[in-house]
Image: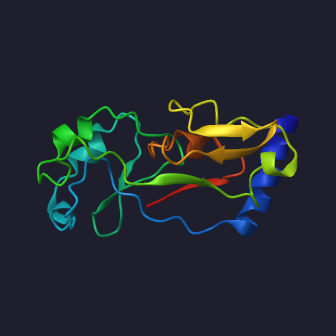
């Protein structure tokens, strides 16, 4: 119960210092993608996403929403993309995670390993009990750390 109250408190405080997230496009997007084809597509990529993180903006262009989960690299969106915008299996998510020290509970002397636990690449390391840092070469941009952060201190940027 104290954990929920603490998470709510830090979540509210973090909104004061929250940086604007950039739009992250789905994995496997070809480098020259304009996403114009997506505007008239029936959005099969959205429907097949196991993690339910592919959404469409008001113009019908797909983006990733890491608020509830991360990308498992299942390739289902790649296979379902009719316009072939998602057609490069070697290009995963073109983003890296960042930690806001103003919002991160660990940077404010609260023990929290929420971001480290789901990181399959061990890209998040702690300097002692506090102060997590992200090793850029290891971060794949999967977003699992974003969804679990109780203070919304982690964001992805391109």
Q: Quadrant of residue 113?
A: top right
Instruction: Residue at 49%, 48% (x, y): give it.
Output: 66
For the residue pair 80 and 127, the one nearer the viewer reads as 127
Tell me: residue 3, above or below residue 39: above
Residue 67 placement, left or right of 76? right
Most foreground residue, 6 or 31 = 31
4 or 77: which is nearer to us? 77
At which x and y percent is residue 151? 72, 51
Is the C terminus in the top left, top right, bottom left or bottom right quadrant? bottom left
Q: Position of residue 15 (x, y in %)?
A: 71, 64
Q: Which residue corresponds to the image point at 74% horizontal and 60% vertical from the top-left?
A: 14
Image: 100 above or below 66: below
Q: How many labels were placed on the picture? A: 0
Q: Would residue 73 be found to the left or right of residue 76 on screen?
A: right
- Image quarter where the N terminus lies is top right
Q: Position of residue 123 (x, y in %)?
A: 56, 38
The quadrant where residue 7 appears: top right
Residue 115 in view: no
**For residue 111, above or below residue 62:** above
Does residue 106 appear in this view? yes
Name the residue at 68% across, 58% down.
100
């Amino acid at each position: 119960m104290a954990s929920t109250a603490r998470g709510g408190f830090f979540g509210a405080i973090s909104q004061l210092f929250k940086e604007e997230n950039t739009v992250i496009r789905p994995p496997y997007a070809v480098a020259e993608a304009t996403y114009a084809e997506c505007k008239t597509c029936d959005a099969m990529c959205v429907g097949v996403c196991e993690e339910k993180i592919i959404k469409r903006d008001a113009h019908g262009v797909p983006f990733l929403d890491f608020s509830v989960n991360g990308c498992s690299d299942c390739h289902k969106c790649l296979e379902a993309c009719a316009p072939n915008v998602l057609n490069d299996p070697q290009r995963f998510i073109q983003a890296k995670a960042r930690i806001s020290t103003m919002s991160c509970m660990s940077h404010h002397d609260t023990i929290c390993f929420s971001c480290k636990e789901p990181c399959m690449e061990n890209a998040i390391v702690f300097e002692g009990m506090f102060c997590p840092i992200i090793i850029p070469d290891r971060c794949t941009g999967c977003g699992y750390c974003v969804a679990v952060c109780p203070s919304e201190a982690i964001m992805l940027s391109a």
